[in-house]
Image (spheres, helix red, strand yellow):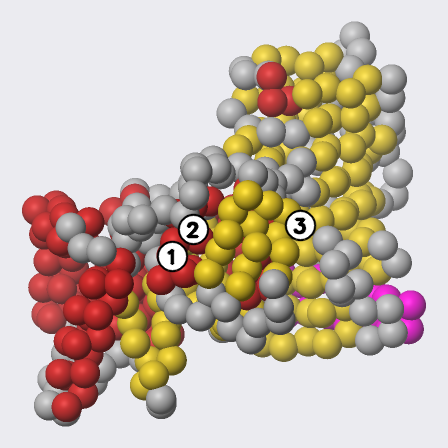
Amino acid sequence: MNEQPSEEEARRVSHLIAGFIRNDLTPSERQELDDWIAGDKENMKFFERTTDVENKEKTLSWLRALHPDQALEKVQKKIRKNQQGKKVRRFVQIAVAASLLIAAGGWWMYKAAGDQEIRAKTTVLEPVGKSIAPGSKKAMLIIPGRTIDLSDFKDQRIRFNDVNGAASSKGALAYDIKKPDAAIHTLQTPAGGEYQVLLADGTRAWLNAGTSLSYPSSFTGGERLVSVHGEVYFEVAENRGKPFRVRVGRHGITVMGTRFNVQAYGLDSITHVSLLEGAIRIANEKSSVTLSPGEEAAVERDKIRIRMNGSIDDNIAWTKGLFSFRETPIQQVMDQVGRWYDITVYFEKPLNRKFTGNILRNSSLEEVLAMLRLSGGVQFDIKGKQVTVRP
């Protein structure tokens, strides 16, 4: 019998299975899942059990019938029994992770217990306070002489002049430029908003909440220069004769046809850059470095720190409707939650808590907080649009 899968394998396979059920796998991800299924008969059996509609509904019904504390205690007892008997089922990690990602508001929760980790299946049963809805597709487009609320546009065309314009549809803006025009446009998402844009050169950009992206309506010079404040994921159209450059405060990023994420909210004066494909060169006031796929950089005024991230896709999980945490401090978790739900977060006292897991971004704020509360070590008080975090 094969050995218990590693945490990394469990996480990856659960992601693929959940994506299969949601029907949003890319062709390469589907091939990866098919290869895993074909690799072992037990893999095939597990996949069939997990994706069977009747089995999935039974699992979710069982979870919904439990109080959160009771659900956690039942899983803890089962894990303790397995540990005492020295028997660990081969697919425990994958089954738990997959069921959590599949469940509405799915959450993959880790809780420390000595040297052991407890993995618990949870669903939200007791929300905290009055419901606060998640963010949505909304943005403002600022062009010379006009400010356009894109939240009000559905499948409509925006005219800049007699020949140039853009189409706004379902949370995305696409430029249609027939005559070169270097006028600077700025797309802004508020707290609680996200948006996409297809630039005139074919580059796609995803804007997270609280973000500003400035760019010319068409790239007329020898380079394609844009400016970012906040978080943007780019898929850059290749044009070797006209390099794509990103200005983030005093830092610069030169792109060589690539997919990458930039996070620069200015909270800690650090710009975080993650490279998924291609190559980029990052420069600050003192040095420059080139990133390879799978690397991420923390860029400060006088230094650049680089590390390899084996789960680099987690950094763009927000573009796929997920919060994705991996040993993430509670302060950073709540920074993301605060921006997406447009709330103000206060800490009653400093907390040393970290979280690993995935939460659907279309969950209500109360569902998200209930999941975090269930993991232990944190409580939340909600008053209007203010949330206080306490031990």
> The residue tagged with tag 3: helix, strand or loop?
strand
Residue drawn where x is 63% and y is 47% of the image: 344
- Which label lies toward us, 1 or 3? 1
Query: Where is residue 83, by image quadrant?
Result: bottom left
Residue 38 or 185: which is nearer the viewer?
185
Indicate yes or no whether the magenta region holds residue 354.
no
Instruction: Give neighbour class at mark 1: few <14, some 14-19, many 20+ (Cα, 10 Å).
Output: many
Q: Is residue 323 above or below residue 213?
A: below
Q: Is residue 170 visible?
A: yes
Q: Which residue is mark 2?
A: 368
Residue type indicated by callout 2: Val
Where does residue 110 sit, x and y in percent of width and height? Answer: 37, 72
> The residue tagged with tag 1: helix, strand or loop?
helix
Q: Which residue is mark 3?
A: 231
Please state the extent of the stretch shown in magenta in the rendering. Answer: 278-293
- Which label lies toward us, 2 or 3? 2
Residue type indicated by callout 1: Met
Q: Is residue 36 visible?
A: no
Q: In terms of sequence position, does the residue under pointer 2 or pointer 3 come before the other?
A: 3
Indicate yes or no whether the magenta region holds residue 287.
yes
> The residue tagged with tag 2: helix, strand or loop?
helix
Query: Where is residue 385, by image quadrant?
Result: top right
Q: Which residue is mark 1?
A: 371
Residue type indicated by callout 3: Glu
38 left or right of 190 in image: left
